[in-house]
Amino acid sequence: MSILFLTTILPRKKRMGSEVASQCFIDALTQNGYNVSVVGYMRKDDVFELNPQEILIDKRYIETKKAKLNSIIWLMLSFIRGMPYSSGKYYSSTYIKTVKQLLSTNRYDAIIIDHAQLGWLQKFIPDKDKLIFVAHNLENQIYLDCYQNARNWISKLIYKREANLIKTMEDKLASAVQQVWSLTEHDAKYFFKIEGVKKIKVLPLSPGLEQSQSKPVTKQFDIGLIGSWFWKPNEEGLRWFLENVYPHLDSQLSIHIAGRGADWLTDKYHNIKYRGIVPDAQEFMAQARVVAIPTLSGGGIQIKTLDAIASGSFIVATGVAIRGIYQPPSTVKISDNPEQFAKLLSSSVTSPFRQRNFDEAKNWYRFRQENFMDDIYRAIEELSLANNLLINKK
């Protein structure tokens, strides 16, 4: 069975949480025995050989902060085409031509549109009976939150426009496909309310088990934080941690922060070390006595929470950071109160390591991964069965 997977960035390098999630779907489909073709862009600075599974559209800037004049072009394109800015930066005639060519020369049993920002592609796919939409989160809600938190009227106008337009694209795509794959019950409830939506599948996303630590790692620092700090919700959470949690922590605790986009942290705090991009995110989390995940907004599932659980380290997270993660292992503590958040971090740092904690986290992670694999298989087989019945009727 052949599957066409249309995404934004070829996700194999897994540089951001969304890419980890996309690769997780691709891996699950492949491990279930399906032949998957992945179509997408690469970043300008990406350097890796394409595998036979991957089809490159082009290399381009992705993050707005690095895009320079390209961000203005994207904005103009989004106004000309009446589409969200976050879609405009992925829109291209090359992508459209590639999809049309693939559909004309190959037979696919399922076509997956990964991310709402690619919703404009669905009108170029004639056979809607094979379409699946992977909704990583509620994009319109994320931009609505940004609108509500914006501090000047220009930002408010931009975010309000983005929230309205991405909602239209998100809703239209959801009603056009045969299945919507949602990552949380919360997001699924939203899609259930859209007129014309056919099937909603809630999938317990879990990055590949091979990423999990097979045994405990020697701890090298007290508190670890990791993320792509270019992303607004991540930056918001990091600043909340520094402004509201950090003052309640012992100044002797060693805090390491990893990820792109927080260079402003360098040498700013005597006990905080900014490490930038680390070679292995999960190894970094495994080296921390406790991982802090201070997310305040956003949608979908927090990938780094899943990876942190797999690392076996203790975790202190906000309620938002564990959305869609039900009955987490005892290694996870939750608080939205800054002072309590700090107390939980401090107590976790001094808590003795126990093998049973590590084993519990690993077993929880394995069980979730097995469920995810099974759910993906059932969803594809259900789509295939429905299409076969449709063909027989014709």
Image (cartoon, grey):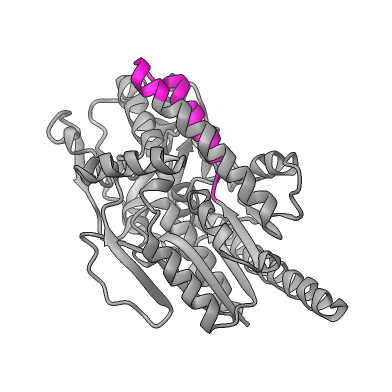
Q: Position of residue 196 (x, y in %)?
A: 76, 48
Residue found farthest to the left: 267
Front position in the image: 100 or 7: 100
Residue drawn at the location 52% of the way across and 68% of the way down: 5
Residue 137 appears in the rendering:
yes
Residue drawn at the location 21% of the way across and 47% of the way down: 276
Residue drawn at the location 87% of the way across and 77% of the way down: 393
Front position in the image: 373 or 255: 373
Q: Position of residue 369 (x, y in %)?
A: 59, 64
Left or right of 238: which side holds 303?
right
Residue found farthest to the front: 80
Q: Position of residue 183 (x, y in %)?
A: 61, 50
Q: Main secondary structure of the magenta part?
A: helix
Q: Quadrant of the N terminus?
A: bottom right
Left or right of 8: which side holds 131?
right
Residue 25 occupies quadrant? bottom right
Residue 140 occupies quadrant? top right
Q: Position of residue 57 (x, y in %)?
A: 35, 67
Left or right of 233: which side holds 67?
left
Above/below status of 254 relative to 336: below
Residue found farthest to the top: 152
Q: Bounds of the magenta span?
A: 136-157
Residue drawn at the location 46% of the way across and 61% of the way down: 7
